[in-house]
Image: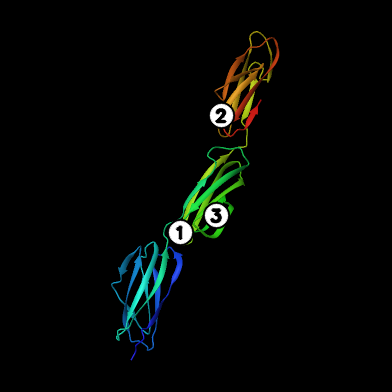
Amino acid sequence: VDRNAPSCDLSQNWNWSNSSTQELFLSVNSTFVLAPFSASWNWTSDQTTHVATTPLLVLNNSSSWTLRGIPEGESTITVQLSTESGMVSTCSSWLRRDYTPAEVSLDVPKSITNDSAVEIRFNASDIGAGIANAILTINGRVVQNHSLLNQSTLEVIGEYNVSEGVNFVELVVVDVSGNQMFINDSFSVDWTAPSVQIFFAANQSSHHVFDKSGATIAWNITDLNRVETAWITFENQSFSIEQTSGFMTLYAATGSWNATVHARDIAGNQRHN
């Protein structure tokens, strides 16, 4: 005679995962070694109960099976044991699934700069399992490495030394379940001022003795990126020039005068000649 309901234990895995399957193990503790019998089971997710169509076969007081199609979020698995004597007991297990990677944003300089160090900001948020790791690299060099965070949001602002030319920034964020999000961007650094050439057409030199006929100067300006503005100063006067190469005739009182061509690129670097 057995008047005691068997107790059962269902293996639990409360850790977050991004796997849609889970192997479960059921063990039964009974006063007597039970003959093979079936147990019904169901699982609940988002307040919806799914009843299994295939019962579990409990053999030698244990059973195992694989649960498939686990939805995102938290799920509860419940097993009900019924013996021939009519004794009933239940046991439960819980699962947590997160299939959605973190949301991330990356903020780098939007225009060409001539700074040797720039500010870079990134944000990450994960409302499921939480953020486990975030790595920021510039040109393949790790500049930020945050690990084992287990938090829902992360914001990092830093200033980093950079190289002239195009700089490549990459951000990789992995959540606790193993979902990965990758984002990249780039920005340009220009430390080189424009190249400025000027000469007087008459003698190919940088100075000229003026007479009433004036003097014609020529110039040529080049830059790695783009010239933003250029101008000529002469005899306390300033003349804006629209083209990076050209010529202009200047007039002044008889004597010796200097003309200067100035140029500034879009990064702010400036040079004159």
- Image location (x, y in percent) of residue 101: 44, 56
- Image location (x, y in percent) of residue 147: 55, 59
First in sequence: mark 2 vs mark 1: 1
- Residue position marked by numbered label 1 in the rendering: 179
Q: Which residue is depicted at the point 48% across and 59% down?
A: 130
79, above or below 245, in the image: below
Q: Count the labels in the image.
A: 3
**Marks 1 and 2: in contact by CB < 8 Å?**
no
Q: Amino acid at mark 1?
A: Asn
**Disc 2/disc 1 C-alpha distance (Å):** 45 Å
**Quadrant of residue 267 within the rendered picture:** top right
- Image location (x, y in percent) of residue 48: 32, 64
Mark 1 lies on a secondary structure that is: loop
Residue 135 got which mark? 3
Of residues 81 and 208, which is closer to you in this image? 81
Mark 2 lies on a secondary structure that is: strand
In the picture provided, is 79 more to the left or to the right than 221? left
- Residue position marked by numbered label 2 in the rendering: 228
First in sequence: mark 3 vs mark 1: 3
Label 1 Cα neighbours within 10 Å, binned few <14 / some 14-19 / many ≥20: some
In the picture provided, is 222 more to the left or to the right than 11? right
Q: Amino acid at mark 3?
A: Ile
Q: Which residue is depicted at the point 50% across and 52% down?
A: 124
Point out the residue furthest to the front here: 3
**Quadrant of residue 231 within the rendered picture:** top right
Q: Which residue is depicted at the point 33% across and 80% down?
A: 81
- Mark whose residue sits in front, 2 or 1: 1
Mark 3 lies on a secondary structure that is: strand
Label 3 Cα neighbours within 10 Å, binned few <14 / some 14-19 / many ≥20: some
2, above or below 39, in the image: below
42, above or below 62, in the image: above
